[in-house]
Every structure is written in C-alpha cells, then in structure tokens.
Amino acid sequence: MQYLQQLDQCGSDFKLRPLDQNDQYKSIIGGLGSFIIYSSCLSYFIFGMYQWYDNQILPTVVNIQQYEPIVQTTINDNLISLKFKEQFNSTLNSPFSYYENILTILLFTNRDGKFSVQTAFSNDTTAINLSNIYLSSNQVNKSQSYYSISICKCIASYVGSCANQSVVDDFFKQRQASLDIKIYLKQYNYREKKYEIVEEQFGYPITKFNTFYTQIKLSMTKSSVQDNFLFGGSEDSTYISKYELISQTPDISYMINSFNQTVYQSFLITVNNLVQDQQVLYPSLGDVLASIGSIIDVLLLLKFIFIFINEKVCFELVLQRVISFYYPEFATQILINRGFGGFIQSVYYNGIQLDTELFKQQYAELRSTAINKLTFTNTLYEISRIQFLLGLLIKKDQFLSCHNMGIKFKLKAAQEEEMESGVDLSIDPDQFGILNLLENSHQISQMTRVFQLQS
C-alpha cells in the first residue's frame, strides 16, 4: 500500500489563503475579463465546429504534375460529342444522315498497333458521341492507343446513299456551316464533395478548300480524397481533367494525296504522359479541434494580464493588512486612493487630506518592512526570537509541558463527561481563537480608541 501511495501522481498541495476563506484572490475586473475571454473561446469553438459541419472549411489540396512513361485509362462515360450546327431557315437535312449523305464520319482506332475503321453513326443523325474508349501512351516500347475522327466527303461504301452534287453545293454555300465539338471533363467539387462534369465547347467551320486538322491531347488526373471523421482510408479516382488543342489547316489537296479521301475535318484523340497527382485532404475532427485550440490558446494569453493585475492588487492588500497589524489606523482611518497602475494619488486621514509626497516616502519604508516580513525565512527568524524570549521568562520544564497542553472538547448542549488522558486539558477554550484574524476587526476598533485616548 505504501508503494502504491508513492506512485500517486495526483497529489494535492496545501495552499495558504491570502486574505479570506478563498484559496485565490478574485476581483470584479478579473471576473469581467474571464467572462469575456471564455465567452470568446466558446463562441469561436461553436463557430469552428459549425464551419466544419457545413463544409465551409476548404480542404488542403496538393497538385503535383509529373511525367509517367506508361499512361493508360478507360473512359466509360461520354467523352466527346460532335454536332452539326443548325442553321436558321435551313431546308437541308443533316449532312450526317445515312441516306442522302453529304459528310461521312469515320472512326479510326489504333490499339497498340492494331488499326480498325468504322462509321460513327448514331440514332441522332445530327450528333455523334464518343464513349467507352481506351487510351494509352507507352513511351517504353513506343506504343500508343488513340482514336481519330475524320469528317470526309460522302463514301458510298459506308452509307446507304450519297446526296447529289446540287445538294452538296447548296450545303457548302451556307454561310455558317460548322461543326460544334464538346469535350466532357471531370472536376472535383470541394464544397459538395463530389465529382462534376464540365463541358468545354468549341467549333470549326466546314469548307471545301481547307482541312482543319486538330490533335486533342487529354490530360489525366489521379485524385485521392481523404474525408474521415477521425481515421480511415482514401477514395481514389482517375479521370480526364483538361485538354490541349494543337491545330493545323493544310490544303485539302494534301489530305486527298495522303489518305485518298476528301477530308474536311480530322480530330486525333490521344492521352498525355504528363499526369496530375491530386491529393485532397479534408480536415478531420482532430485537425479542427487542433486549429480551434491554437486560436483559443492565443485568446487565453489575455488571461495572464488579469492574473498579473490580481496578483499585484492581492499583494498590495496583503502588505496593507500587515502594516495595519502594527498601525491599526491603516485599517479604519487612513484612506488611500490609487489610480491606474496602483499609484497613490491622494491620502485622507479621518477625512483630512495629507501631504501625498510625504506620505509616499513614509509608506515606502513601511511597505519595504512589510515585504521583508512576508518572507519565509523572516517568519522563522521571528518565531526563533519569540522562542528565546519565552525561554528567558519560562522555565525549561514549563516550556516542555506545552507539548501536553490542549483544550478539552465537549458539546455545549451535552453534559460534561470526564475523560482520562495524559494531556492537560485545563486550557481556556477561548484561547483557540483569541489571536485569530477573524477577531481582527474588533481588536482594531478597540486599539484605535486606546491610541486616541493616549494621544
């Protein structure tokens, strides 16, 4: 049991009370300051927790762009949409229609060196959508998987029938015959905590004399989102986040000589080897509490200002109380008015103002003596002097007999019972409180009257 007692880390210190029954000196200004400080801390804590609950605290986002020699991705969603721009007051059919076709859309696929070509028709004859594709770029073995979309002059082998020449001429006479291209990208919404589709749109005119050749280089993002209450893993995702256009406008004869086809527009879709690594870290409960705690620590630093004020006021009150033990008028008849910082401004004795400067000099001497009396060594020294004086007045046997002296305890309303003990219990019970500071107020008033009569 004694060993366990030595292990106790929750020991309690005994504190002497400075002035009254409270362990600490407390003041009105300290109470007001404490109320303001702790109210501010509580308000900021509630505000911080509400921001965290309402997703108003933005996450920490780290974006690192790096080169990867091998990049591959499969896109299941709709990636690219090509649509012929509708003309006002146009009586022409869609140029992509299966019958009376004007423009044939061919989709070329290269998957690691294996080529294939097919038409890219859909139920909507005005729009072509590209989805469920696989893209890769391997710089190690110099292989690549890409797609190419070509808008060609009608090829009879891929359509039901071609439009006659007059219909084709009327089509190219339109002032704004163009093709609108939409690329669907992804981005992460930090506030809503979900991925969103972003639509990018641009257009190219369709002319009989030039070919618009465009390479669309798609950039991939590898995202890792950590959003946990305390602990947990991360949610990983890979998606296309941006693109780069590289355009050329060669003469249409160049495309005829190169591909044996009249190509009006051609789009090469590849993936970039520059990959963006994105780390999204939402603050957890521990992070929020740590952030709030740091601000609260700063607010609590203001507490030391009020602690300093209370310590200074408490020390001055104790000094004045000690001085009043020897000069009782300081407790009842002398009024000291202090200003900001505790400096003495005026002094009154029984309502009569005294010379402030002269009083300051004398009070400084009394204050210095009182400070010395409050030291622990001085207290032991004064007790030792009292012991020596008592030793001169009292014999040693009587001095030692004080160890066996005490006050007999008895209930005031009960009948006194004699109890046998080895202790002298004949001491007057009033001795227990005769020198108590609680009696100080009565003694000071009586001593003050004595001093007045003597003077």
Image (tube, helix red, strand yellow):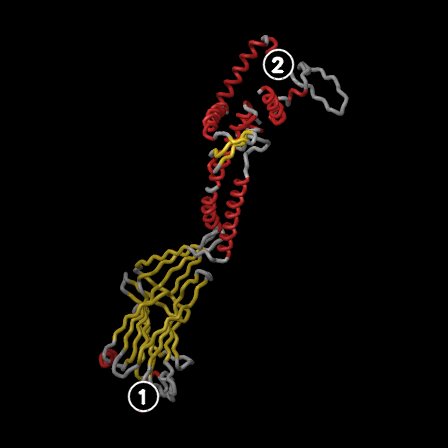
Quadrant of the drawing holding the C terminus? top right
Q: Is residue 197 left or right of residue 352?
A: left
Q: Is residue 32 left or right of residue 155?
A: right
- Residue 222's place in the image compared with 383, above or below, is below
Quadrant of the drawing holding the N terminus? top right
- Residue 280's place in the image compared with 219, above or below, is above
Q: Nearer the viewer, residue 79 or 106?
A: 79
Q: Nearer the viewer, residue 354 or 272?
A: 354
Q: Can you tell which of label 2 and label 1 is closer to the viewer?
A: 2
Q: Where is mark 2, residue-wise?
A: 402
Residue type at mark 2 is Cys
**Residue at image point 53% right, 43% down:** 32
Residue type at mark 1 is Val
Q: Residues within 10 Å of mark 2 (few under 14, many from 20)?
A: few
Q: Where is mark 1, residue-wise?
A: 168
Rendered location of residue 288, percent (x, y): 47, 50
What distance separates the C-alpha of mark 2 from that of mark 1? 131 Å
Q: Quadrant of residue 452?
A: top right
Q: Residues within 10 Å of mark 1 (few under 14, many from 20)?
A: some
Rendered location of residue 385, percent (x, y): 52, 15
Instruction: Give the structural element (helix, strand or loop) at label 1.
Output: helix
Instruction: Give the structural element (helix, strand or loop) at label 2.
Output: helix
- Residue 417's place in the image compared with 331, above or below, is above
Rendered location of residue 100, percent (x, y): 36, 88
- Residue 244's place in the image compared with 303, above or below, is below
